[in-house]
Image (cartoon, rainbow, N blue to C red):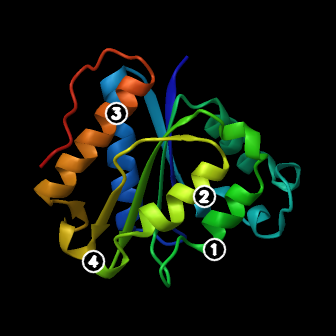
Amino acid sequence: MSYVIGISGNIARPSKTRVFVEQVARDVASAIGTGHATYDIEDFGPSVLTARRTGDLDGAARKIVEELLQATVLVVGSPTYKGSYTGLFKHFFDLLDPSLLRGKPTILLATGGGERHSLIVEHQLRPLFGFFEALTMPTAIYASDKDFVDGTLASSAILDRARQAVNEAVRAVGAEPRGVSLAA
């Protein structure tokens, strides 16, 4: 069974990053006719803080890791802190064996306060997932605070890029698209 998993590098709620990851994960799932789930780093619980390998995670966190590893498509995103992804986001991915994401279609997203951090997806996230040999989609998306209205992604340019990334993921899994809605 196919499934789409979203991972947001946020530790706070509500979160624009979570909203963005959830929206794209939902639209990929809708386009390929499957279910989806989105998790924040906070959802892994306190065991992620001291874990040195996935076996150190508590049962709930290991269940999320299993879902992630079984996912047909990943949608990953992080808010930008000091020009990069969050530390716990990186720590979580450091727990995974590098071969486990090999070839997995992955959409890269990031959010930040302004345009000066827009290259995080190319200079930080793409190399990280390249190390894992994930199949990152050509279109990665960065959204700044101005792209959201009342906590909802509202920029037509960003929504267009998200649609493009969703379509790339649909093609990567060889699914027949069922329509990509991404509300404007």
Kindly identify which numbered label has been placed on residue 128.
2
Q: Nearer the viewer, mark 3 or mark 1?
A: 3
Residue 94 placement (x, y as % from top left): 74, 59
Q: Secondary structure at mark 3?
A: helix
- N-terminal of the pair, mark 3 or mark 1, is 1
- Which mark is on residue 177? none
| Circle 3: residue type | Glu
Q: Earlier in the sequence, mark 4 or mark 3?
A: 4
Residue at image location 43% in from the left, 62% down from the top: 121
Mark 1 falls on what kind of element? Answer: helix
Q: Are marks 3 and 1 in contact (CB under 8 Å)?
A: no
Kindly identify the amino acid type of the residue bearing the numbered disc 1: Gly
The disc, 3 or 2, on the residue closer to the chain's N-terminal end is 2
Which of the two labelled residues, at mark 1 and mark 4, occupies the earlier sequence position? 1
Quarter of the figure with residue 174: top left
Specify few, some or many for label 2: CA neighbours under 10 Å numbering under 14, 14-19, or 20 or more.
Answer: some
Res. 45 visible in picture: no
**Is 119 placed left or right of 131 in the picture?**
left
The nearer-to-camera label among 1 and 4 is 4
Q: Which residue is mark 4?
A: 115
Decide: is 71 above or below 163.
above
Query: Which is more toward the observer, 54 or 47?
Result: 54
The mark that comes first in sequence, 2 or 1, is 1
Task: Return the residue found at the far bottom.
Answer: 82
In the picture, measured across the screen, residue 134 lies left or right of residue 59, that is left
Which amino acid type is shown beneath numbered disc 2? Leu
Residue under pointer 3: 168
Q: Which mark is residue 87?
A: 1
Spatial CA distance of label 4 from label 2 is 21 Å
Q: Marks 1 and 4, Cα distance to the nearest angstrom?
A: 21 Å
